[in-house]
Image (tube, rainbow, N blue to C red):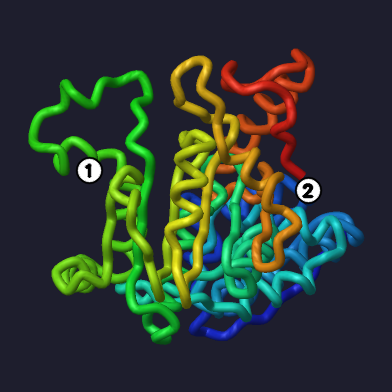
Amino acid sequence: MAEKIIHFDTGTDIVGLFGSLDKNIKILEEEYDVTVIARENILKLSGEEEKISDAYKALEKMLKLLSNGERLDEQNVRYTISLAKEGSTAEIDKLISDCICITASGKPVRAKTFGQKKYVEAIRDNTVVFGIGPAGTGKTYLAVAMAVKAFKAKEVSRIVLTRPAVEAGENLGFLPGDLQQKVDPYLKPLYDGLFEILGADGFQRGMERGVIEVAPLAYMRGRTLDESFIILDEAQNTTTEQLKMFLTRFGNGSKVVVTGDITQIDLPTGKKSGLEEAAKILKDIDGITTVRFNETDVVRHHIVGEIIKAYEDYAKKMGGSTNGKQGKGHNHR
């Protein structure tokens, strides 16, 4: 049995490295069949020499993530290990180096996967971006972060976030309150991202000044939005007509991000989603691009990625769709 000793600074967050109940290190030990022990300012790796060498490369990058203000969790530990096994650990430095913005609590917002990095770069370089992929891939959150960054840099004068108020097995009319109170639950994911990045006070000030607007898609009809960063979320629940209406609302100096998951369509039976169709129709226009996510880009619990993959495999086996409403053609790269 071989051993390798790693010396680290006394200020290193060893508790953060090991994780709650040593979860992070247990993942590393299981993946490489090694043992990791912390003693004062050293880490000792024990196991077969080749496995220790591989585990060391992953551990080095985990320590680098920590030193750059990233909180280690199961998702980024497993992602780091997967890159190490592919021999791509050097690529992690590219993810670490690109901070989009800082949240109200001081947390840096960065792309956590290469799919997310491609998405962020696409938003930076294009006027209209379609972000298509499964839940948990950060499509909406990263779009909101890029909107805040553009607003603070005075590249746009306001942020507009919208969603179709499509019922997922519930009836809007039976919800209590006026129209705004009825649609607020549909818009909550948009509020959540803004709250985290701007803080409650920053969000409230933006709403009061009219530089932040969160509204149902129906409110977009008949408007022209100049110098705005506009995000349409849950676009798989728009019809062809609705999406065309939305995509003709933006004016000079604006940027548009359209996000959606075509495996989770809540439109009534017989209604076709306009999202995939729009991405195909507009694919050859300069300034418009589509970024597709897959289960490796999921930044929630790692089992969420496995669930998505299982449903996709089942859909391929059955030759249909995972939601039973849309036909073939919703492949994710």
What residue type is disc 1 on? Answer: Asp
Q: Residue at x 36, y 57 (%)?
A: 161
Can you say which quadrant of the picture contains the C terminus? top right
* Residue 157: percent from left, percent from top: 34, 78
How many neighbours does mark 2 have within 10 angstroms: few (below 14), some (14-19), or many (20 or more)? some
* Residue 243: percent from left, percent from top: 49, 44
Q: Residue furthest front?
A: 222
Q: Residue at x 34, y 49 (%)?
A: 221
**Mark found first going from the N terminus, 1 or 2:** 2
Q: Is residue 122 left or right of residue 260?
A: right
Tag 1 secondary structure: helix
Q: Residue at x 72, y 53 (%)?
A: 283
Q: Height in image: 89 above or below 11?
A: above
Comparing 208 with 98, the one in front is 208
How many neighbours does mark 1 have within 10 angstroms: few (below 14), some (14-19), or many (20 or more)? some
What residue type is disc 2 on? Answer: Asp
Provide the residue designation for mark 2: 33
Q: CA distance from mark 1 to mark 2?
A: 49 Å
Q: Is residue 232 visible to the viewer in this orientation of the structure?
A: yes
Provide the residue designation for mark 1: 184
Can you say which quadrant of the picture contains the N terminus? bottom right
